[in-house]
Structure formats: C-alpha cells, structure tokens
Amino acid sequence: MDNHMIAVVGAGTMGHGISQVAAQHGYEVLMWDAAPGVVERAIGIIGDRLAKQVAAGKLPESERQQTLKRLVPVTRWDDLASASLAIEAVLEVMEVKKEVFQELDRVLPADALLATNTSSLSITEIAKVTRRPGQVLGMHFFNPAPVMKLVELVRGEETRDDVVQRAETFAHSIGKETVVVQKDTPGFIVNRVLMPLFIEAMRILEEGIASAEDIDKAVKLGLNHPMGPLTLADLTGLDVDLHVMDYLYDEFHDDRFAAPMVLRRLVRAGHYGRKTGRGFYRYS
Ligand code: CAA
C-alpha cells in the first residue's frame, strides 16, 4: 500500500487476526470496533499470542514490541482518514456492512481501496453504497488469519483491474497467496466447497451413523485434512457457518446448502463453537 497505513474495521476473531499479520509485516494498523474495549482486548490477545512465540524462541521480543506498537486503537471514523486500504471484518449482516462502507467512503482518501472480509455476501451490493464502487473488492481471509496462507480476492461488478492488482500486491506483501474470484458469487470458491462438507458431516452425526469424534477422525485420516469438519466448524464459528449456509441456500435455492437442524439448535442455544466454549465439542 502507498503509505503503509491500513485500517481494520471490526476487531473480532478475523479482524484481530488480519491486524496481527499486517502489523507483523510492517504496516501501521488503525483498529476500530463499534463496541468499547474490543480493540484493546484484541491487542491483548495478539500480545499474548506473540509472547508464546517469544517464549518458544520463534520470535525476538523486540519484534513483538514493534508489532504491538504498530497496532493503533481508534474510536472515531475520522481517525481512519490516513489509511490507503480499509479491510472491514464486522458482522455478516448486509445492513451493518453498508453503514460501515458509507463511513469508510466518507473518510478515506479518494484513491484508497475499500475491502470486505465477508465470507459470502455480495461485493457489488456493498460497493453500491459508496461513490467508488470500482475501488471496492472482497479480500476474504481464513481462520486463523495469521496462519492460513490464502486470501480470496473477489471482484464486484464494478471492481477495476488495477484495484485487484493493488490488493494482490498488498496480500503478497503480508505473506499471503491469492486467488481471484472473477464473478461476485455467493460463497466464492472456498465456502462453496466447504459448506456442503460441513453439512454432510452434520447430517451423518444427526442420522446417528457415527460419533462426532469418528466423523472427524475419518476425514482427518481418510482425506488428510488438518482438522475434521466438525472441529473446523467449531473453529470458524457455528453462528457464522449457519449464516453462510442460509445465505447460500437463499441465493441458490439448492438443498446442497440446507443447514442441518443440529446446527440450528446449537446456534439457537448460543453454542457457537470454540469462541463460546461449546459447539459440537466442549472447550475448557
Ligand atoms: N491464531 C493464531 N495462530 C494460531 C492459531 C490461532 N487461532 N491456532 C494455531 N496457530 C498457530 C500456532 O501458534 C502455531 O504456530 P507456530 O508454528 O509458529 O508455533 C501454528 O499455528 C500451528 O499450530 P498448532 O501446532 O497448535 O496446531 P496445528 O498444527 O494443528 O495447526 C491449524 C492448527 C493451523 C488451525 C490447523 O489445524 C489447520 O490448518 N486447520 C484448518 C484450518 C482451516 O481450514 N481454516 C479455514 C476455515 S474456513 C474459513 O475461515 C472461511 C470462512 O469464511 C468460514
């Protein structure tokens, strides 16, 4: 990016993961969240995570300190005015995202890029609320963002070629690999492949065919995946997974994406997976 200053809007799991990677690669990161205290908590989590790497001899303490210094909590939209790229990682709710993009469009410089980390929503629809739809695109990171190599770059209808190239250059500068999703399509590539896998694993559980542990073990060892699908669903967040499935189902009208009742019941009970301490598994 032109001035090595970016904004990350939303400091939940994805927001703080993205902030950490960018700061570790030399970017100053302006961190904003609607809820008070969330950014400070996120910086605390990043500090603890980096401290573990220092303790394991994988990171010099000086680098930890420098990374933390590059994370700048901000509270007003106008504080984001120097960023040349904003990455939005707020709730997967279209109306919330539209409000955020209106503010970003108002305060960021005219040539700045506005990216959304949405995992499935329409880039075109988000871009439409701005005066610069050509400079809006999807930059979809994966959980855990500091570790996962991929960023899906997703074009909206109006996204310009040079904007995709600038986003690609940025992603490479923070150590990520990219793929370009040429059409704004629900679920892009990864979630379109992943959700049917989650759904089938949940149906096998629901039908009493195998235990959660055995379903995960089967996929891990039988397909050489690093995690079984139910463990991974707990990691990505069952609330997020359900949201993505419902959106794909609404868009495609296809039973491949119909969310299983076992998932709906867990989400209704507030069991969102690892982040709430309970999902398909319990976490202490
Ligand atoms: N945040 C930051 N770093 C983390 C982390 C986290 N939540 N979890 C693990 N790590 C780091 C560890 O610190 C460790 O780093 P070092 O090598 O520097 O020590 C490294 O990752 C490996 O961790 P572990 O040895 O503890 O465990 P592991 O080897 O089993 O790897 C894993 C953990 C990387 C999460 C691995 O199990 C994995 O790749 N799982 C699949 C993850 C995946 O598929 N994510 C995509 C989800 S889909 C999505 O995100 C899209 C969506 O829109 C829903």
Image (cartoon, rainbow, N blue to C red):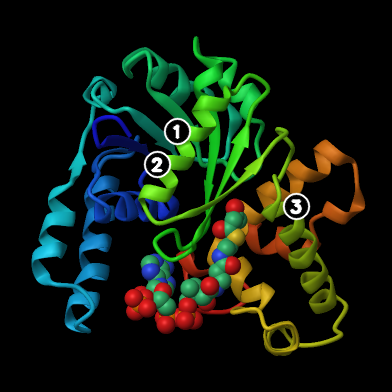
In screen coordinates, is 128 left or right of 90? right
Label 1 sits on residue: 166
Image-quadrant location for residue 111: top left
- Which type of secondary structure does the marked residue at label 2 adopt? helix
Residue 61 appearing in the image: yes
- Separation of disc 2 and disc 3 at Cα? 25 Å
Q: Amino acid at mark 1?
A: Arg
Of tags 1 and 3, which is closer to the observer? 1
Q: Residue at x 46, y 64 (%)?
A: 275
Closer to us: 92 or 105: 105
Image x and y of residue 17, in percent: 38, 55
Q: Which mark is residue 144?
A: none
Q: Are marks 1 and 2 in contact (CB under 8 Å)?
A: yes
Disc number placed over residue 170 in the picture, else none: 2
The residue depicted at 21 percent of the width and 34 percent of the height is 74
Is residue 284 shown to the viewer in this render? no
Q: In this rendering, would 155 be left or right of 15?
A: right
Badge 1 element: helix
Q: Position of residue 163 (x, y in %)?
A: 50, 27
Residue at (45%, 55%) from the top-left corner? 176
Q: Which of the marked residues, 1 or 3, is nearer the chain's N terminus? A: 1
- Residue 262 against residue 210 in the figure, above or below: above
Instruction: Indicate left or right for 56 with 140 as reference.
Output: left
Residue type at tag 2: Phe
Residue 155 is situated, as x and y percent measured from the top left of the image, at: 63, 31
Q: Residues within 10 Å of mark 2 (few under 14, many from 20)?
A: some
In this view of the protein, which residue sits in the foreground, 87 or 242? 87
The quadrant the N terminus occupies is top left
Q: Residue at x 82, y 38 (%)?
A: 250
Question: Which mark sits nearer the N-terminus, 2 or 3?
Answer: 2
Of the two numbered discs 2 and 3 in the rendering, the one whose residue sits closer to the viewer: 2
Location of mark 3 (residue): 192
